[in-house]
Structure formats: C-alpha cells, structure tokens
C-alpha cells in the first residue's frame, strides 16, 4: 500500500480474510474498500504514522472496524509499518480478525462481573442472616413478655390494646426478618416434592386479584408436571413478589406472562449451571423496565426504587434466596421501556428425590392466648438449652407459668452434664439450634446415643448448618421458629409430651 492508501500488493491470506482476489483489489483505495466505518480513524493514524516516521522504519499498532467483500464487519487488529524505499516509502499493513478474542474478552468480563455480584450478594446474605438471627432473639423476648403481660390483664383493661399493638408490631418485624433469612438461605423450610404447574394453578386466582383488571395475565404451562424440591409457601412468595413488582412497573396496564417448561442443560451451555434437567419458570412483563445500574442491584436487600412507604426492598432478594437455596439460578433481562423478564431455573426432582426428600415441620404461629389451666399442673421437667440469657429467662417464665419445672442451660455441654448426672429425671429437651460450641444438631446426635428415649423440641431464628438441618428432622423431634408466642411453645411442648406418655 502506498502512502495515499492505494493497495499495491495483496497476499493469499488477505484474499481469504476479506474475500477480494488480488486482481480485484489492486489499485483500489484500501480505506473505502476495507475500512469504511473506521475510515477517518485509519486516515488519522496513517497521517500520524507518516509524520512520525521521518522517512525511517516505523511501526504502529491500533484497532479498527474492517469489512469483507460480502459486507460482514469484524473487529481488526492492525500493525502498520512505514518502510523506506528508494524515492519515498511504502506502507505495510498486517490485519488480524480478532472477533473470537473480543468474544472471549467479553465473556470473561461477564463472568467476572457475575462473580463480583455473587460475592457481593453472599456477603450481604451473611450480614442479613446474622442481623436476622440477633433480631429474632430480641423479637422472641418482646413477644414472650407481651404475651405474659396480656395474660395478666383483664379483658377491659385500658392497656390491653397497647400490649396487643406491641405484639402486632413484633409480628410485622418478624415478617421482615423472615424475608432476610430467605435471602440469606438460612430459613428452615418444609421441603417436599412439588409440581410447579399445580402451585401456579392454585395461586392463579390470587395473582389475578393482586394484578387488577388493568393487567392481562397469561399463563402457559405444559401438560407434563414440573416437579422440584421446594417449600410451597416460598414458591408462592416467589410468584407473588414477581407479580407485584411487574404490576408496579405497569401503572397504566400491560401484560404479565408466566410460563413453565422442563429444560435440559448440557455441558456446552455456559449459563453457570451443572448439566442436568431443570424446571424453568419465566415471568415477563411489558412494564417500564430497569436501567443497568438498577438491574445490577435488583437482588440487594432493602434496595428499592419505589416511593417511601411503597416497598421494603425485600421482594427480589427473597426470590434470590429461594432460588439459590434450591441450587438454581436466576436470569434477568431488562431495559428502560422494554419490560423485564426473569428466568428461574430449579433442579428438577428425580424419583429418588421424591422418595427421600426431607421435611422439617414448623409449628403454626398461633395468636391465641394461653387459656386458663383446665388440667392439673403438669408433673414434667423440661431441660431448656438457650445461649441468649434474655430469651432463656423469657421462655423459662412462660414454661413455669404453665406449671413445668425448668432446668436452664446456656450451652449443649452443660445440658449433657445435667442429663448424665441423673439427679433430676428429664421429660423433654427444648434447645436452640444455634449454640456456642456444640450446636443443637450436635446435641441431638449425642442425645440419640445417650438418651434415645428423650424427645426434643428445637427452636431457632435460623439454622446455617446443613448437618443440623438433617439432624433435627424426625418423628420425635419438633421445630418451632422464632419469634413464637407462648401459646405456640406450650402447644408444641404439650403435644410432644403427649406423644411420649400416650
């Protein structure tokens, strides 16, 4: 190529890359033929190259957009050299198609960004779980003492309503902490094999009422069951949260589409999931969409773009917690004024999983007061293991008011020492799952060896120990989630002892 940009030589590699033969391109201007989109840039670089070379050998490297004979564009690396020749200089250009390199760089950046987002959400999850755990202990003290106080008041007491407001506020706070625990994947759930299609069918009337008449709901589910391991309440919460977000993004109306299918993920698919069969849930709307900055923070707890008082910022973080706890993955596609689409993948349940799925039952959080005792005071002794002193005192008072004898212990080792001493016969162990030293799950394992006949009730704001989750399941073990009322605790204890004594 001469300094004016006219092609003077064209080798076989250039023929293969650009599609022009040597005869077709010789004498033609390289810039208008090969670099029309980057012509100004290439001209500028060539002019600078010629000036700076000073007539000597000089090399320069830059990128530009190139075009083949059939019009295909591709990113190109150019290494341009000014070579002095008799009577002037010639310009040699080495051109490399870097499409694959650019794709690899973009994929690496996407993976890196996903990794940063996962790490950020994991850190937020650990923080949220820790806060929720401590907060649930505080709420348990509030709920327990509020219940005890209310039981002492006459029905027409002027402060009875105030005490009830305290309980109601504590329950609202408990709902928030429950969502935090779901986000951090530390909520204890009732896991069973579910058909997502059936869950959607049963929830459809509620979804239509939630969306309102101005939004068209379209549900597309196939004839085949979409079975997965999950908690029906959590799956319903996922669907409702996504529907509410979609509704708020379509104030003037629009369409919400919910679809399910069974999907096979192969090793060649780079979506961050192991190969296998998945239940795919797609929820898409025609709403306002999100900017890139908002989408990147969509799953963060307490992050919301809604006006003050219109949202907690926990809706999508709860969805994130439910899906990732199942071993699944979320995908989000959105843009301003282009709507939003969520694609959720849950591992499909196998026949083996259906047979062996674990279940952890949670006691309903009844709001009934403790009724006046209609039977003789119980003649049973309960070993209460709880490391938080304020919680331990509150639960001791609840149990003792009902007539139980209570032996308190602050950790599992102390509890085992009391049991092994055998000075007082123990009828029931009530233990927190999260304890310093030996956990509640570890205590359960020791009880199964040393005192297999002893029933156990587990209490916790959350459990972060997979082994503990497995150990607290079983026919003679019950679980009650903080914060619970005194009535719920007494009911659980009484039912458990009744099962032992017949």
Image (cartoon, grey):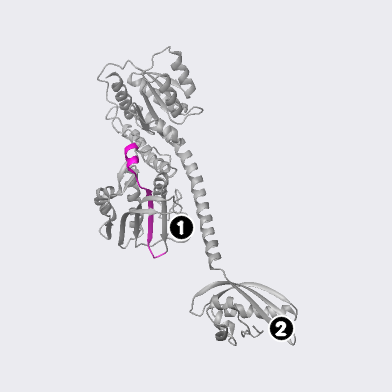
Element at label 1: helix
Circle 1 crowding by C-alpha within 10 Å: few under 14, some 14–19, many from 20: some
Of the numbered discs 1 and 2, the one sitting upstream in the chain is: 2
Residue 297 screen position, x and y as percent: 47, 54
Check if residue 399 falls in the magenta segment.
no
* Of the pair 10 and 452, the residue shown nearer to us: 10
When asked about the image quadrant of residue 55, the answer is bottom right
Picture quarter with the C terminus? top left
Rendered position, 133 above or below 390:
below
* Of the pair 248 and 331, the residue shown nearer to us: 331
Residue 287 screen position, x and y as percent: 36, 62
- At x 71%, y 79%, the residue is 83
* Of the pair 18 and 278, the residue shown nearer to us: 18
The boundaries of the magenta stretch are 336-356
Is 55 left or right of 24, judged from the image as shown? right
Labels 1, 2: front one: 2
Picture quarter with the N terminus? bottom right
- At x 48%, y 20%, the residue is 414
Counting the numbered discs, the total is 2
Residue 310 visible in the current orientation: no
Per the image, the residue denoted by label 1 is 294
Element at label 2: strand
Per the image, the residue denoted by label 2 is 89
Is 389 left or right of 209, judged from the image as shown? right
- At x 34%, y 28%, the residue is 489
Residue 282 screen position, x and y as percent: 35, 56
Is 396 left or right of 116, judged from the image as shown? left
Residue 49 visible in the current orientation: yes
Rendered position, 93 above or below 385:
below
Is 108 left or right of 486, judged from the image as shown? right
**How far is mark 1 from mark 2, CA to CA?**
54 Å
């Amino acid at each position: 190529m001469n300094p004016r940009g006219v092609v003077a030589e064209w080798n076989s590699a250039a023929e293969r890359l650009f599609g022009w033969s040597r005869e077709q391109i010789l004498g033609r201007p390289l810039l208008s033929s090969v670099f029309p989109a980057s012509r100004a840039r290439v001209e500028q670089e060539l002019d600078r190259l010629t000036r700076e070379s000073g007539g000597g050998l000089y090399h320069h490297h830059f990128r530009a957009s190139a075009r083949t004979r059939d019009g295909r564009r591709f990113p190109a690396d150019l290494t341009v050299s000014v070579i002095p020749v008799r009577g002037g200089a010639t310009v040699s250009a080495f051109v490399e198609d870097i499409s694959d390199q650019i794709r690899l760089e973009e994929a690496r950046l996407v993976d890196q960004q996903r990794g940063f987002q996962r790490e950020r959400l994991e850190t937020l999850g650990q923080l949220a779980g820790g806060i929720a755990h401590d907060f649930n202990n505080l709420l348990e003290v509030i709920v327990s003492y509020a219940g005890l106080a209310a039981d002492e008041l006459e029905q027409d007491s002027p402060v009875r309503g105030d005490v009830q407001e305290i309980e109601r506020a504590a329950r609202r706070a408990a709902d928030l902490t429950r969502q935090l625990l779901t986000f951090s994947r530390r909520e204890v759930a009732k896991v069973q094999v579910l058909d997502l299609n059936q869950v959607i069918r049963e929830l459809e009337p509620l979804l239509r009422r939630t969306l309102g008449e101005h939004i068209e709901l379209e549900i597309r589910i196939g004839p085949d069951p979409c079975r997965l391991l999950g908690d029906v309440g959590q799956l319903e919460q996922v669907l409702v949260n996504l529907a509410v977000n979609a509704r708020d993004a379509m104030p003037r109306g629009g369409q919400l589409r919910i679809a399910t299918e069974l999907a096979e993920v192969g090793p060649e698919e780079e979506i961050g999931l192991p190969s296998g069969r998945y239940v795919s849930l797609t929820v898409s709307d025609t709403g306002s969409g999100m900017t890139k900055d908002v989408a990147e923070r969509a799953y963060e707890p307490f992050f919301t773009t809604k006006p003050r008082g219109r949202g907690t910022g926990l809706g999508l973080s709860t969805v994130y917690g439910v899906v990732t706890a199942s071993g699944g993955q979320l995908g989000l596609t959105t843009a301003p004024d282009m709507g939003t689409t969520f694609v959720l993948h849950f591992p499909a349940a196998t026949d083996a999983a259906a047979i062996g799925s674990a279940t952890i039952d949670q006691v309903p959080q009844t709001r009934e007061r403790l009724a006046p005792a209609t039977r003789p005071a119980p003649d049973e002794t309960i070993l209460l293991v709880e490391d938080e002193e304020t919680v331990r005192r509150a639960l001791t008072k609840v149990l003792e008011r009902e007539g139980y004898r209570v032996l308190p212990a602050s950790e599992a080792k102390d509890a085992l020492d009391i049991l092994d001493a055998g000075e007082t016969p123990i009828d029931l162990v009530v233990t927190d799952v999260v304890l310093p030293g030996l956990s509640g799950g570890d205590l359960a394992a020791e009880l199964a060896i040393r005192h297999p006949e002893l029933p156990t009730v587990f209490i916790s704001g959350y459990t972060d120990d997979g082994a503990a989750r497995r150990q607290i399941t079983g026919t003679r073990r019950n679980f009650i989630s903080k914060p619970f009322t005194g009535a719920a605790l007494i009911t659980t204890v009484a039912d458990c002892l009744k099962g032992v004594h017949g």
